[in-house]
Amino acid sequence: MSDITNQSLSEILENVKSKKISSLELTQAYIKNIENAKKLNAFITTTFDQALENAKKFDNKPNELLLHGIPLAVKDLFCTENIKTTAGSKILNNFIPSYESTVTKNLWNCGAFLLGKLNCDEFAMGSSNETSFFGNVINPVGDQLVPGGSSGGSSSALAANLTPATIGTDTGGSIRQPASFTGTVGLKPTYGLCSRWGIVAFASSLDQAGPMTKTVSDCAIMLEAMSGFDEKDSTSINKKKETYSKNLKDNIKGLKIGIPKEYRVDNMPKEIDELWEKGKKILKNLGVQLIDISLPHTKYALPTYYIVAPAEASSNLARYDGVRYGHRSQKGKDLIEMYENTRSEGFGDEVKRRILIGTYVLSSGYYDAYYLKAQKVRQLIKKDFDDNFTKVDAILTPSTPSSAFKIGEKKNDPVSMYLNDIFTVPVNLAGLPALSLPAGIDKQGHPLGLQLIGKALDEQKILNIGYAFEKNCCYKNEIKKWWS
Ligand code: GLN
């Protein structure tokens, strides 16, 4: 069989089911690829021995599960029982959880098993995977390019065939932006569809786990496997589990898709505009009705996000004090100095910046002016979407304002880095699902993505639109292997 790791998850599942390939052979093929891809720095931890054992076990069992015998690498923000979980931070460099996150447990219950833990921005704060304590991740698209962030290890590993599918987390774009930068599919589900239990928290009212895959069908399979009600997460939505992959259909005739005028931002590269036009044309040819809409509060989304997210982060990260787990400084003469030194040594610059901003906007005297105000604006942003979803089934926008940028290009300019999230953050503030689809390439041959935003819990519809789009877009990801 030609290289199995080039295939989509759906194709691989077929081949495992029909016994054209065993789970053991499949796992060995991925291990070989991972060993030859050290230059990408996509992995923080590998669990090869355990993966091989699991593969053998699944080869001896009847194939009845959705992900039977599939090795998967996951973002190192998901706690994995007895396996180091770092969140890309020095402060969790030695943290070995005694529990498994619900989302990863759901995947394992569907027959998948762990191949390794993927690099990410520290505590998922970043858009380029340059804030990780474990070093930059490289985009397989080009050796000078960032893979996006914060799920940069996930996007890089997926695009380089180091895992057949993966999962990331998205607080302000961290699944969709890296998917867009690597020519892969990424879905941020409705807030509450996937349990947050056992995921290292960044901003709890925005964080959501989701799939990153090569195709839309793969995305439906992964979402089906990972989602579901969890009583351990108080924000988990209690609803019947859906079978997204079975219900996938490509007839989208008659659907109404909104085109928001506020997403045409100043200085947007022409190529992004052209990509958007191309997307509209494809959908129109599929019988969709395009409707111009307005989301008037879009311009406040980024400033609102950069108040709410750091505020929640400063509170969530207060727990890292060196006492019960994680890095502990050996310096200091009393407890307070130990705390201070631990946090000063353990956190990187971007995380410190967020803690400072967050603490400031929550401090007495400023709370009303910043945090409370941001919460009110957040409601207006959500209302913009609610109002429009009475008229349209989904919304089409670009995923990012540019293709993958160069390593180091934005690192010393946080505002230009934050601007990269301009099209993705409104969705998190409103708690909605959104799918990033590979849709074209720029002049340099770097992938570009389009985003489909859906109503709350309307994942099936955006997956269906994405499925039809993918069949008609003819996007082909032709990454040339330069790293081994
Ligand atoms: N890039 C955004 C940030 O740095 C989003 C990160 C994320 O979604 N985890 O906050």
Image: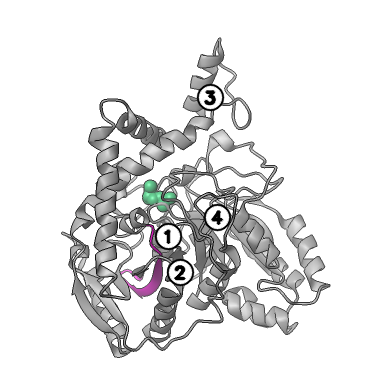
- What residue sits right under mark 1 in the picture? 178
Between the residue at mark 3 and the residue at mark 1, the CA separation in whole angstroms equals: 31 Å
Total numbered labels placed on residues in the image? 4
Q: Residue furthest top?
A: 333
Q: Which residue is mark 3?
A: 342
Please report whichever mark, 4 or 1, sits nearer to the chain's N-terminal start. 1
**Foreground residue among 479 and 203:** 203
Q: Residue at x 24, y 41 (%)?
A: 373
**Which residue is disc 4 drawn over?**
195
Local packing at callout 2 (Cα closer than 10 Å; few below 14, some 14-19, many 20+) is many
Q: Earlier in the sequence, mark 2 or mark 1?
A: 1
Q: CA distance from mark 3 to mark 2?
A: 38 Å
The residue at 25%/68% (across/down) is 388
Query: Would you say residue 182 is visible in this rendering?
Result: yes
Q: Secondary structure at mark 4?
A: loop
Q: On the rendered structure, is 32 left or right of 127?
A: right
- Side of 374 where 465 appears, left or right: right
| Residue sitting nearer the eye, 465 or 366 | 366
What amino acid does circle 3 point to?
Thr
Secondary structure beneath dot 2 equals loop
Whether tag 2 and tag 1 are in contact, CB under 8 A, the answer is yes
- Which residues lie in the magenta part? 431-445
- Mark linked to residue 184: 2
116 vs 462, nearest the viewer: 462
The answer to whether mark 4 and mark 1 are in CB contact below 8 A is: no
Q: Are marks 4 and 2 in contact (CB under 8 Å)?
A: no
| Residue that appears at 43% across and 85% down | 471
Amino acid type, mark 4: Ser
Discs 4/2, front: 4
Q: CA distance from mark 4 to mark 3?
A: 30 Å
